[in-house]
Amino acid sequence: MESRGIFSTWTGKIIVANVVTFIGFLILQNFINPNQAVSLVALMPSMILMGEGLWTFVTSMFMHAGLGHLFVNMISLMFIGGFVEKLIGKRRFLGLYFASGLFAGLFFVLIALATGVDLNVYAVGASGAIFGLGGLLAVLTPRLPVLVFFIIPMPMWAAMGFLIVVLWVLSLGLGLPIGNVAHLGGLLVGLGYGFYLKQRYPRKTKMISRHFSR
């Protein structure tokens, strides 16, 4: 009998990979200096600009700053990722997920270089990739009703813009270490891919939009 649970999907496998990476990092900190451990997995513009740690474009997508950070991202991925994977298929889902996450990291590095901010600030987390999935849904299913922060009802198109603005305001006002630039980079990839699919498959995407609107 074929398993249809969340962990039989690529979304589930990515969630498992994130959890395993987080646990592995906690174990690694017991054997080497914590700052050295961070430098092995976190994306730091200063290292990238020196041509070092290029693998952190990938490892940073699976690492999180704490248990709360991991929990919020994995809950979001479980709902959004599972839906997107069913909507566009496994191969397109994987392509979009990693393209969004990688571009989010690249965008973070480029903006850090352009603005001259602290190049030693690091970025970790799956949220850049998750924002890419949300950006796709904002285009393909703009009127899909969702609960922002699990309590505020909004259509999908408004929810993504609202999240970007609110998280940016919170980070500036409260000094929270939120990867706003990475979020924006991932969102741009998702929006771009959504418009590409709408142009290439106008009938299918129009049908999808109508089906998931209320």
Image (cartoon, helix red, strand yellow):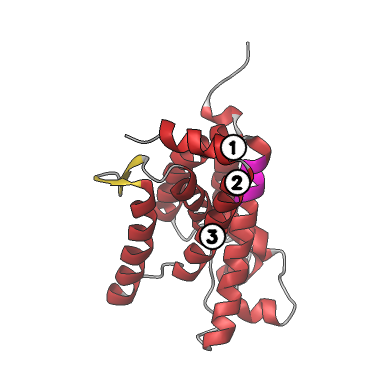
Which element type, helix, strand or loop, lies under badge 2?
Answer: helix
Q: What residue occupies the far bottom of the structure in this picture?
A: 116
Question: What amino acid type is highlighted by mark number 1?
Answer: Ile
Instruction: Give the labeled residue for mark 1.
Output: 88
Expressed as whole percent of the image width and height from the top left, the position of residue 176 reads 35, 70
Question: What amino acid type is highlighted by mark number 3?
Answer: Gly
Expressed as whole percent of the image width and height from the top left, the position of residue 2 reads 63, 15
Which element type, helix, strand or loop, lies under badge 1?
Answer: helix
Question: In this orientation, which residue lies closer to the viewer: 120 or 8?
Answer: 8
Q: Quadrant of the N terminus?
A: top right
User: Circles 1 and 2: CB distance less than 8 Å?
Assistant: yes
Segment colored magenta: 92-97
Q: Quadrant of residue 146?
A: top left
Instruction: Give the labeled residue for mark 3.
Output: 186
Q: Residues within 10 Å of mark 3 (few under 14, many from 20)?
A: many
User: Circles 2 and 3: CB distance less than 8 Å?
Assistant: no
Question: In this orientation, which residue lies closer to the viewer: 177 or 82?
Answer: 82
Question: What amino acid type is highlighted by mark number 2?
Answer: Leu
